[in-house]
Image (cartoon, helix red, strand yellow):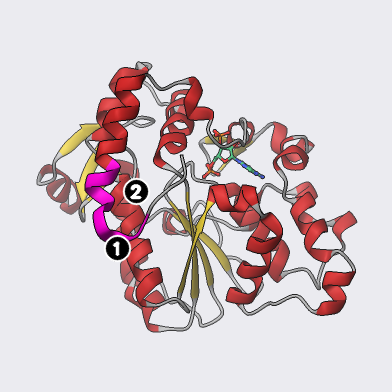
Amino acid sequence: MEDELILSSLSKERGWAIPDLYLFQQFWCPSTLIKEVNNFQKQFQAKDSDIFVASFPKSGTTWLKAIAFAIVNRQCFSIHNHPLLTSNPHQLVPPVEPVYRGDVDFPTIEPRLFGTHTPFPSLPNSIMECNSKIIYICRNPFDTFVSSWIYYDKIKREPLTTLKIEEAFEMYCDGIIEFGPWWSHMLGYWKESLAKPDKVLFLKYEDLKDDANFQVKRIAEFLGFPFTQEEENNQVIESIIKLCSFEEMKNLEVNKSGIIHRFADKKYYFRKGETRDWLNYFSPSMTEKLTKIMEEKFGESGLSFMI
Ligand code: A3P
């Protein structure tokens, strides 16, 4: 009853993958998640050692979860007998919100690694009040759009019909998409990474593609698990990059079939894994419109993308 009252007071729009999105705490929250986000905010007790892999969906979350898990647990597992070969990264680094639905268990080993799509201002206070760390992965809004449009169509729920690319694009430009507006999501973490660089590390998918070695070292240092010279000499960084690469992960049996967290088909997390695929989908007018929106929204924030 209380839940229904809350919902009836919120603006509502059609989602991309689920029928209803509600404008909750200034983001478009899937109806199924409002209660979980509420409980996450009220009940979650962060520990100093916790690590959060945060992202706007379709920005490379799966990849960063794999990399973070491999970095912090590298003393525990050999690369040839690694949990990432037999478990999907979303199982090893579970999303934190569904814990409050009872679908997912908290990790039992420390440091605990969690995923979250919750926008920065809606994170529980306890995360900000302790020494836990947040790594945020951001992807250029052009590729994020294409990846989202294709992915959400595959996992959409009844009675949703396929959104034409033009329809999806208009919604995207209005910020209406699961966890949108995307610009607020990105800016929330971006600004916090500038204000508290020891707390939030802001990463870009394109940079990770461009120089994985440098970025993996940067992530390890930020998380407090820097590589020793001996590890560097022994090619530990290169072996982590290979283990987590798109080609390796996509071809693992564990990632080819099966459902995860009750709704997501594992194989859909791995599509092309490339940058600039948007060039295959955008018309000149779409390019112009999105470029303008990015200029308007990101303005003087310092956040920019190579597209
Ligand atoms: P594409 O749809 O452009 O291929 P998320 O993990 O946040 O859902 O993001 C999914 C996107 O990341 C998809 O992009 C997917 O193919 C890509 N991806 C998944 N695993 C990857 C990896 N190991 N390396 C690079 N990209 C990866």
Rendering quadrant holding ligand 1: top right
Q: Which mark identifies residue 278?
A: none
Q: Which mark identifies residue 33?
A: 2
The residue wearing badge 1 is 122
Task: Identify the amino acid type marked 2.
Answer: Leu
Which residue lies at the image location 61% right of the left edge and 53% below the top edge? 208
- Considering the numbered disc 2 on the image, is that residue within a helix, a strand or a loop? helix
> Which residue range is magenta in the image?
294-303
Disc 1 crowd rating (10 Å Cα; few below 14, some 14-19, many 20+) is some
- Does any atom of ligand 1 lie closer than 8 Å to the CB of label 1? no
- Does any atom of ligand 1 lie closer than 8 Å to the CB of label 2? no
- Considering the numbered disc 1 on the image, is that residue within a helix, a strand or a loop? helix
Which residue lies at the image location 79% right of the left edge and 50% below the top edge? 242
Which residue lies at the image location 26% right of the left edge and 34% below the top edge? 173
Q: Is 195 rendered above or below residue 93?
A: below
Task: Identify the amino acid type marked 1.
Answer: Ser
First along the sequence among labels 2 and 1: 2
Residue 235 visible within the image: yes
Q: Quadrant of residue 269?
A: top right
Q: Real-space Cα distance between discs 2 and 1?
A: 13 Å
Position of residue 121 measured from the top left corner of the image (x, y, whole percent) = 28, 64
Residue 159 visible within the image: no
Q: Does the segment drawn in magenta span residue 307?
A: no
Position of residue 292 measured from the top left corner of the image (x, y, whole percent) = 25, 37
